[in-house]
Amino acid sequence: MSEPLVIFDLDGVLVDTQHAENGGLAAVGALMGLTLTAERADELFSGKKMQECIDLMAELAGVEPPPDAIPLARAACEELIGDRLDPIDGVRTALAGLADAGIPMCVASNSPRELIAGRLDAAGIRPYFGERLFSAYDVDAWKPDPRLFLRAAESCGTAPEWCVVVEDSVVGVDAALAAEMTVVQYAADPAQGPHRAGVRVLTRMDAVPEAVRAHRPTRTPDELRRVEGAA
């Protein structure tokens, strides 16, 4: 493949639902006696698996979570999102630019696949990805584990060196680095970290195509095939 594969995270990169997810989790936390500010919820939950977040709240509260904690959190999240879901500013421009250049794209998220598809549909950007949607639930591995990104690359027929990951959370950045992929971190406010040394930070999503064009793997596809053939 002569062009890189662009792997997008979902929440906080393509659509802005992280605050709603955090709010849904905080609502479950309230049932457990926890009072969490928006800032504290973001610190505790951003980029993490939902069950991990609920286990963390149980540890903080010293009580068992409700048996239906995950459905309760998801229902509260959907209520906060409402009927309309807009892409993050600049996303439509970025996706159109990549598509016009013939650069393939996919989504790899810690969320369940049906949730990924639903949110892309609601935002009107699903056609850019088709069925190239990858969920941590499918590989039973959640970021910062690199296996989700590696599965996405393998399924799309692209070597890790040719992948560019677009992430917002540090756990996602760490997963991409562990997969030995190039990663750019989207942060509308670059003062809000953490950021990893050497990782490029983008303050606008419409800057993604330029960042992808600047990507140059250390080995060409022919070189990679020769190495694989010699193995």
Image (cartoon, rainbow, N blue to C red):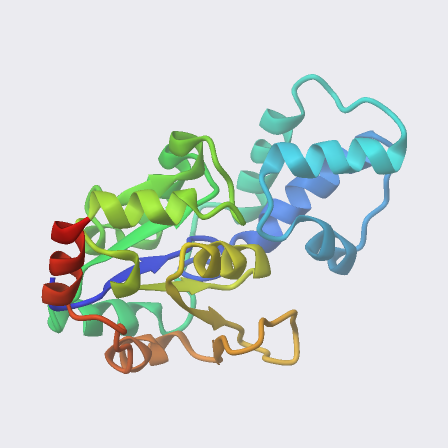
Residue 26 in the image, given as x and y percentages of width and height: 73, 42
Q: Please name the residue shown 53% across and 76% down the image.
A: 188
Q: Please name the residue shown 44% across and 46% down the image.
A: 83
**Residue closer to the observer: 121 or 169:** 169
Is 40 left or right of 104, judged from the image as shown? right
Residue occupying the far front of the picture: 230
Using the rendered image of the protein, determine whether residue 132 is visible from the camera's viewpoint: no
Image quarter of the N terminus: bottom left
Residue occupying the far top of the picture: 67
Residue 231 in the image, given as x and y percentages of width and height: 19, 48
Using the rendered image of the protein, determine whether residue 80 is visible from the camera's viewpoint: yes
**Residue closer to the observer: 139 or 209:** 139
Q: In this view, does 34 lie above or below 197?
A: above
Q: Is residue 187 above or below residue 24?
A: below
Is 206 left or right of 75, judged from the image as shown? left
Residue 48 in the image, given as x and y percentages of width and height: 60, 45
